[in-house]
Amino acid sequence: MTPVLADVDGDGDLDLVQNEHWGTGHITRSRGRGDGTFEAEQSQVSGVISYGLDVADLNQDGHVDIVFTEREEDEIWTLHGDGTGSFEHERTISICDDPQRVHASDVDADGHVDVLVNCVAADTVDVMFGTASGTLGGTQVIAAVDSPKNVEAADLDEVGREDVVVLSADGLSVVLGICD
Ligand SMILES: [Ca+2]
Ligand SMILES: [Ca+2]
Ligand SMILES: [Ca+2]
Ligand SMILES: [Ca+2]
């Protein structure tokens, strides 16, 4: 299960977006009450069998969007939020062999959200760069490691650029400032 928190309905309270890897894989959201609890009702936002997911405003319209992996077909899906808690399928992108986790972050610091993905069977970590039009553009391999399990980004050396952290069969590896 990948749980992420974001205010998907714009009421100022964080909501819960999650899926179940080994169950249905369907993505649901539960409205947050703003006191640390969530409404019991789960609304399904996608019936596609997802694995990894993340949230970010991908198309820069002020509403939270969802990006997730579909492992069987080696695809990345994007869903655009309308700001009320509903999501609409925006795009399906073919990607490398067995994509698992995704992490949305502006790794090249151009103001557009990019999406990192670890491809377990391809032994790579790829990035899809966000564009001014709000869609994900070209894909670039940023790391070649043995069976990458997870990918994250943070500015570890504090120079204002996101760095990429990869957990793989080789252990932990860090790619500093991939687009410097
Ligand atoms: Ca909310
Ligand atoms: Ca959006
Ligand atoms: Ca970017
Ligand atoms: Ca950095």
Image (spheres, rainbow, N blue to C red):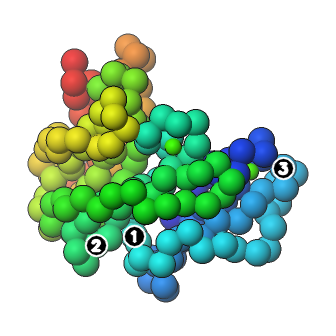
Total tally of numbered discs in the picture = 3
User: Crowding near pointer 2: few (<14 within 10 Å), some, many (20+)?
Assistant: many
Q: What residue would you read off at disc 1?
A: 51
User: Crowding near pointer 3: few (<14 within 10 Å), some, many (20+)?
Assistant: few
Q: With respect to residue 35, does 23 lie above or below?
A: below
Q: CA distance from mark 3 to mark 2?
A: 34 Å
Lateral position of residue 138 relative to residue 32, left or right: left
Q: With respect to residue 14, does 119 lie above or below?
A: below
Position in image of residue 10 (x %, y %):
72, 45
Position in image of residue 29 (x %, y %):
64, 65
* SS for dot 2: loop
Q: What residue would you read off at disc 3?
A: 34
Q: What residue would you read off at disc 2?
A: 71
Lateral position of residue 19 relative to residue 161, left or right: right
Label located before the other in sequence (1 or 3): 3
Q: Amino acid at mark 3?
A: Gly
Q: Amino acid at mark 2?
A: Arg
Dividing the picture into quadrants, the one containing residue 140 is: top left
Q: Amino acid at mark 1?
A: Tyr
Lateral position of residue 145 relative to residue 158, left or right: left
Q: CA distance from mark 1 to mark 3?
A: 27 Å
Label located before the other in sequence (1 or 2): 1
Asked whether mark 3 lies closer than 8 Å to ligand 1, one says yes
* SS for dot 1: loop
* SS for dot 3: loop
